[in-house]
Amino acid sequence: MKTREERVFQAVSHVIMIFASAVCVIPFLLLIISSFTDNNTIVANGYSFFPEKWGLEAYRYLLQRSDQILRAYGITVLVTAVGTVGNLLLTTMLAYPLSRTDLPGRKALSFLVFFTMLFNGGLVPTYLLYTTYLGVKNSLAGLIVPLLLLNAYWVMIMRTFFQNSIPKAVIESAQIDGASEMRIFCQIILPMGKPIIATVCLFAGIAYWNDWYNGMIYVTESNLFSIQQLLNRMLSDIQFLQSNSSMAGAADYISKIPGTTVRMAIAVVGILPILVVYPFMQNNFVKGIAIGAVKG
Amino acid sequence: MRSRSKPRKLKRFIPLYLMMAPSLLYLVINNYLPMFGLVIAFKNVNFKKGILGSDWAGLENFKYLFATQDAWVITRNTLLYNIAFIFVHTFLAICLAVILSELTAKRSKRIYQSVTLLPYLISMVIISYLVNAFLSSDTGFLNNSVLPLLGMEPVSWYTDPGKWPAILVIVDAWKNVGYLSIIYYSAVLGVDREYLECAALEGATKMQQIRKIILPLISPVITIMVLLAIGKIFYSDFGLFYQVPMDSGPLYSTTNVISTYVYRGLMQLGDIGMSSAAGLYQSAVGFVLVLISNLIVRKLEPENALF
Amino acid sequence: MKRTWKWAGRMLALCLAAALLCSISACGGKPQESGAVDSGGSASSKREEASASQPEETQGGGGEEPVELVMSFWASTEPAGLNQVFEALSEYTKEKIGVTVKPFTVNMSNYPQQINLMLSSGEQIDLMCCYYQWFQSLYSKGHLKELESLVESEGQGIVDAIGWDFLNAGRIGTGLYGLTTNRDLAKEYGFLIDKEMAQRNNIDLDSLHSFSDMEAAFEVIKANEPGVTPVIGTEATYAAEYLIPGADLLTDGLGALLDYGEDLNVVNLYASDAYMEMAKMTRSWFEKGYISEDVVTSGENARSYFKAGTAFSALSTLKPGYAFKESKSIGKEMAQVGVMAPTTNTTVVQSIQWTVPENTDYPEKAMQLLNLMYSDETVMNLLAWGIEGEHYEVLESGLIDYPEGVTGETSGYNLNAGWMFGNQFISHVWNGDSPTIWEETDTFNREAKKSNAFGFSYDSSNVKTELAACSNVVSEYAVSLTSGLVDPETAIPEFVKKLETAGIDKIIAEKQSQLDAWAAENGKK
């Protein structure tokens, strides 16, 4: 039973979205195409969607280090899985009580949470605490725990979401029925909060996947490198090798590194797994939201 | 302990406090314990004496932030860009979210959503090369293909500061809008469909539904996002302002922000007192601004305030 | 409401108390000891607090057990055989000086940050390699040990290898904080040239000796070779010292000496005639199309352009054998053309130095190990090239090469960083390099024209504010000026005015007064 107006709205929406998608995809295509371009062609002619000469040197170079890359993928998958679950738990368990307007001390606690978004002690004290007292250096905990496990930003957003889209009446009637707080949390809040929980899950996942900072600070042993740390390191190493003179024996293999295209290939290697996994996640994401909506 | 009169009432909340305990403990460890480091901003740190034992520097460490005639330029740039970002982000992300949520075609909806998230996944360093692919003066697409097509003269992009406010706002929106729209999208999904159906039955047009129902209902989320952005108003995405303009000197008048200024100033010195002073300054200003805006919000819509 | 505030207040107080405790025991743990040479005693009790389970504390007992030293340096990719090499090294040093050595490597770009963190939190590092921008900052944070008396008691081999002449460049103020490695300790600024392209255009390489000779060559290239940029520079090489002969930048270029510092008069380089002249020259190159606008902002390096065949020459720092090595890296025959006499100054020498952290428990042992790195061929060859028979083999000519079946990619120890460890001149020469490369380099070092302020470097702690402000101004203008991107007639006055507001005069005055004191002490002037 679509009205004319509805049809126009749908059509215009598609036009806008197709345009937006094109804007997002075209530079990304350029990224992929340049990773398959011959290095000298790029240096001489610049980046192009239709390169004169294609090349696989970039991937060949990365393939030489495939052992390390696969290992780093493994580490990152593990860290992302554990970290995301932990992050979701901590965020939800803090956001929900803060969303309860009847909770004594709510404002003070919200303030304390918000305060951490703005002020921090800086790297040196944080490092000192985490390495000297908590011993996270060169451990998986070093990749998971510092900074990423709970982000005040998401707590505040999730809190607002709970407050906004879960009617107080629902909670109150459950309380009258004698449901415990834990039960209310598990059986009402979690299902109804699915859209925001799925969102935070996605973002926490991306944050863990893309993180190289914790690795750079807390991990110096190469068998614990996460994928982004490894890729970052490869990038800066290539730059270093290429811009510094060295001895005759090494010169020969430096000359074979395709400096420009390998940068692009490294970016592709870092993003690819997300692209593969995202559609599946999105499926769940949409399902979760549908359930949430029904209950509401 | 004054409120002895309502221990029963408090008891009811114990499970909620317990629920929060692990998260609060984490914040204490990850955020509050290291905060003693804030004193570094006022110290002349010498590790022979330890952090706390180092000599006090007073406000000496803050001075360099105001020591050039560019001090106001970087402050202005930081503020203006952030204000522009807040507007552009909020507007575009909400548009995208609303359109996506109202689209009926399931599959294309999912494709649009994945594709608009793509740019967020690309790191700024790589983005800076992609931007270079468009702007480079000899080989860039704009100078070689687009501008001649429009009959325009080639532009020397990396030496013309006037063009950069627009470029940076576009690049930033390109990277972040898809990501931010997901938050608004989930907020729109939280809106009860019944309201919309009722409104439709009563003959409200799509635009009316959006304006009269969806926007007011997601306004708490909008408010909170804007408030949080205000807190970070003296910070900037370093990569966007340093790498994307390729650190080109002639562009500084429109690309230099507090974060890049601090980075360039301390690259050689590596002074941790001065860098924490910068961080403290940035945070303190954001903090004051948030307090003020929060006060205003609390007056207008107390439910939506941060705290 | 009140009650929660109280609760929050109490929590904060608790945090603060805990934080104080942490920091006091961790970094305030060391009372203000003099920082001079201090054997065992107080230092190792400090380590006991920090990490009680370390076995090394037996050192106090009588030194029978070998001491484990942590030696830190940067390595782009950690070589697979690193531990193997250091085990071999430890075997040897255990016999010699009762020391085993554990390597600690981070890649170049993370090195300063990682080491800073480790030093700040008291992790063990006993000797470390350090590069110059960072040397000053380590010093000002109090991380470096003064080395003079240690060198005198344990480091005779170092003095013999390098001589006080060059070692003195490791001083800040009057204290000695760094020991330069023995490598190329001078610089010859000039151009790297695509030889084949020069010949194709009948450019006689032997006739190129100055900027104006080069300019003539650029003109030919510009006319004959479409699509080729006559001269390439990068952000690093569009620097004043590449283009102004005899400029001694005194660490940071903010206040510099001209004409090899004949008069020891610190001036504002950017306001000098020499700088204006240089900027006009590069501006004319830019206007004639010899310099490409894109080069600085493209993120590519000179080698990529040479490989792609789109560059004729590149501004470079030359040293003996430079073009030969570059030919291999680029895969084309290259030539080098110097346009200034080789020179040297403190900054050049300070670029790679070994330092001993204030934190170490074993300063003497660290110095003894350093001593071996400068005087013992076995140690030096292990560090530079790895294990004989495994990572390299000695050819009949006395030069070395990869063993059968090993290449640069597959070798377990491909650091190729002899310049980083001690005395490069006592290490083997790689096949393909000139067999007399070390003698040539040594001569190059000794014959280089030294700045009159050679050995002086200033302590910037009084002018930090001004330095930070001026560094920003410099990064805004300097590269655009040296690469001809902007018109010097208008940009330089602007530049100089901004520097003055940012306080360059205070830096110049500070440098001048420290330089005068140094000159008086060293009988200069």
Image (cartoon, helix red, strand yellow):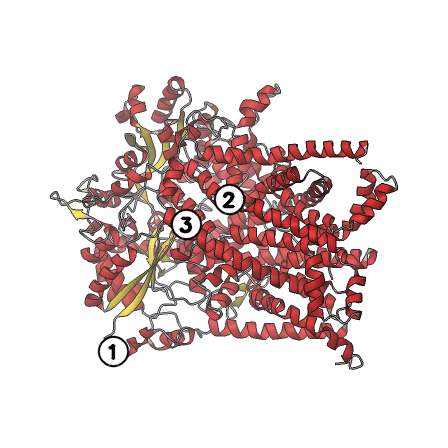
Relative to C139, C70 lies left or right: left
Q: Nearer the viewer, residue A47 or B140?
A: A47
Kind of residue at badge 3: Leu
Q: Earlier in the sequence, mark 3 or mark 2?
A: 3
Q: Residue furthest left?
A: C396
Kind of residue at badge 1: Gly
| SS under mark 1 | helix
Task: Give the alpha-carbon distance from disc 1 to disc 2, as whole Å.
Answer: 57 Å
| SS under mark 2 | helix
Q: Residue at x 57, y 37 (%)?
A: B251
Image mark 1: chain = C
Q: x%, y% of residue A86?
A: 57, 62
Q: Residue at x 25, y 67 (%)?
A: C99
Task: Give the alpha-carbon distance from disc 3 to disc 2, as whole Å.
Answer: 14 Å
Image mark 3: chain = A
Quadrant of residue C114 within the rendered picture: bottom left
Location of mark 2 (residue): A271
Kind of residue at badge 2: Ile
Relative height, residue B101 to residue A163 (above, below): above
The verdict on a common chain for dots 1 and 2 is: no
Residue C203 seen by the camera: yes
Q: Nearer the viewer, residue C480 or B154?
A: B154
Q: Nearer the viewer, residue C96 or C340?
A: C96
Location of mark 3 (residue): A70
The disc placed on residue C62 is: 1
